[in-house]
Amino acid sequence: MLTADPRSRRSLMALGLAAAMALVVGMALGFEHIGGYIPCALCLTQRTPYYIGAPLMLIAALISFAGGPSWAVRGLLGIGGLLMLYGLGLGIYHSGIEWHWWAGPESCATSADAVTTDAGSLLGDLSSKKPPSCDEATLRVLGLSFAGWNVLASAALAMIAFRGAMMKN
């Protein structure tokens, strides 16, 4: 239950953002490692704002719960919002590449994780596994690719972070 105290609301907001950012990147890692969806280079880049943002939001929550200065918490929430705007931009850019609205980077390939480290099956993997291209959506759910869903998640998290950053005391 949210209280009327802005400090308590901001604390819970920062904690919720940390959990939500960790959940989003955790789902991406789950699709990769459990579902077998190999990410392209842009997919991996889109995770960076979450990798940075989740710990920052956790720090913001800890500072707020400890009674630290509100300017520090609001500043960290603002940084979290900016990170999510960056993620939003990356998601829009990647979605546009997938829909062939614009060209992607020439070097768009996946990490070396697509190839095994087992020497016995290395040659077989080199000929059978193909890293995904940034312009091909691996999966679409309700018409949106992973990049498209990242746009929505980043937008929502940015709005929440900025709202928390703008709360007075």
Image (cartoon, grey):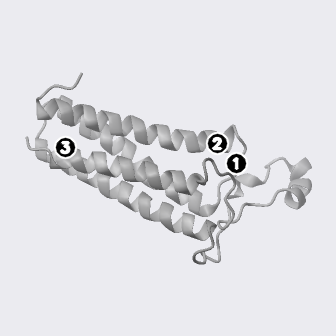
User: Is residue 140 among what the camera can see?
Assistant: yes
The residue shown at (55%, 56%) is 147
Earlier sequence position, callout 3 versus callout 1: 1
Percent across and percent down for residue 10 are: 20, 36
Decide which of 148, 29 is in the foreground and name it: 148
Compared to residue 120, the image places residue 9 above or below, namely above
CA–CA distance in space, label 3 to label 2: 32 Å
Classify residue 88 by image quadrant.
bottom left
- Image position of 8 (left or right of 118): left
State which mark lies toward you, 3 or 1: 1
| Mark 3 or mark 2, earlier in chain | 2
* Quarter of the image that includes the C terminus: top left
The residue type indicated by label 2 comes to Phe
Residue at x-position 13% and y-position 36%: 68
Find numbered disc 3 in the image and state the secondary structure of the residue it sits on: helix
Question: Which residue lies under the disc numbered 1?
Answer: 37
Q: Give the residue type at disc 3.
A: Val
Structural distance between the alpha carbons of marks 3 and 1: 36 Å
State the residue at coordinates (52%, 59%): 45
* Residue behind mark 3: 73
The disc, 1 or 2, on the residue closer to the chain's N-terminal end is: 2
Q: Residue at x 41, y 38 (%)?
A: 20
* Front residue of this view, candidates 101 and 56: 101
Of the pair 138 and 49, the residue shown nearer to us? 138
Residue 31 — which label? 2
* Relative to 136, residue 12 above or below: above
Image quadrant containing the N terminus: top left
